[in-house]
Amino acid sequence: MNFTQNDVAEKIAYEWISTKQENVDVKSEYYCQTRDIFQAKLGKMTMELLRNNSIVENDIYIISAIAGEIGNNSFDHNLGNWPDVAGAFFGYFFENGKLKIILADRGRGILITLKKAKPELKNDAEALKTAFTEKISGRTPENRGNGLKFVRENVEDKKMHLIFISGNGKMELNEKMEIKEITENIRGCLAILSI
Amino acid sequence: MKIELKKFGEMLISRPSGREAYLAMSAYILKGIDKNEIIELDFDGVKVLTPSWADEVITKIAKEFKNVKLINIENPTAQATLRTLREYSDLKI
């Protein structure tokens, strides 16, 4: 992937999920081995944003809910099934009034997760569209799977910007949603939320 | 019967914590309560609510009891979450 100098955060996350298992930095401050660690860091981010006072309070709660849904999905859908390194990457970067939140995991990805519920899915791009627009659960027969619809609706509503990559499918969302195939193949999921 | 959700935390986010909250409610708050009794779910003091947490609690209570009322739902995440549950999880309240 190509990164500009301003994309240092994305570069760190991309390296975290694309490097070989033995090179994954498990001592990284952004690494959350368990859900509890992720939850604690999410709470810390929320409190820091509230103290910082640069973003409207109600928007901070929505941002926290969006990050919570995406981050918890990593654990919900990979628990006991991590291909190599368990856990998630969670970083947030606040500069010049702009907030960037990056979440990533080295999990099974959206396509494999949803194929159990929808075997006809052909590729990562199709799986992304299904995940963000259709009522479906990757943990069938459990009746769940509304989190990414919540994410989409609130990103659109608040005019945020979300890039979500899984496998070689890439979704870009602001006021409209665009999904395409890319040449890179991302292990698991990578989400970049910009506000 | 009023259940103050803030007693389960200000940030109600994950499914496991929602499940735990529902189990605690079932054991200590809702046990033996008539299915026709009015159950008020009070969102006052809740800062962050997600569909994952709410689906484990609100959707289940709404299926179990016939008269569930939602009060103090001004928080934007509560409103957005309830919209999502009504659309994708068949929440009827």
Image: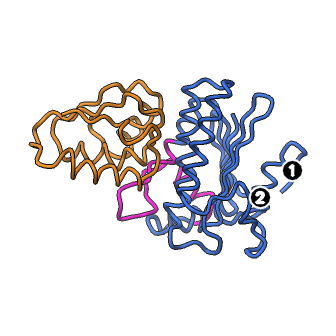
Characterize the local packing of mark 1: few (<14), some (14-19) or many (20 or more) Cα atoms within 10 angstroms.
Answer: few
Residues in magenta, as a range: A122-150
Quadrant in the picture for residue B8 = top left
Q: Is residue B41 left or right of residue A83?
A: left
Please name the amino acid that badge 1 sits on: Phe
Q: In the figure, the blue chain has which letter?
A: A
Q: Which residue is mark 1?
A: A3
Residue A187 x/y as whole percent: 68, 66
Characterize the local packing of mark 2: few (<14), some (14-19) or many (20 or more) Cα atoms within 10 angstroms.
Answer: some
What sort of colour scheme is used for the picture?
Answer: by chain
Q: Is residue A96 left or right of residue A103?
A: right
Q: Which residue is mark 2?
A: A14
Q: Residue at x 9, y 42 (%)?
A: B34
Quadrant in the picture for residue A12 = bottom right
Residue A36 x/y as whole percent: 53, 56
Q: Residue at x 35, y 54 (%)?
A: B19
Q: Nearer the viewer, residue A93 or B45?
A: B45
Mark 2 and mark 1: Cα distance apart in space? 10 Å
Write down the chain letter for disc 1: A
Please name the amino acid that badge 2 sits on: Tyr
| Visual hue assigned to chain B | orange
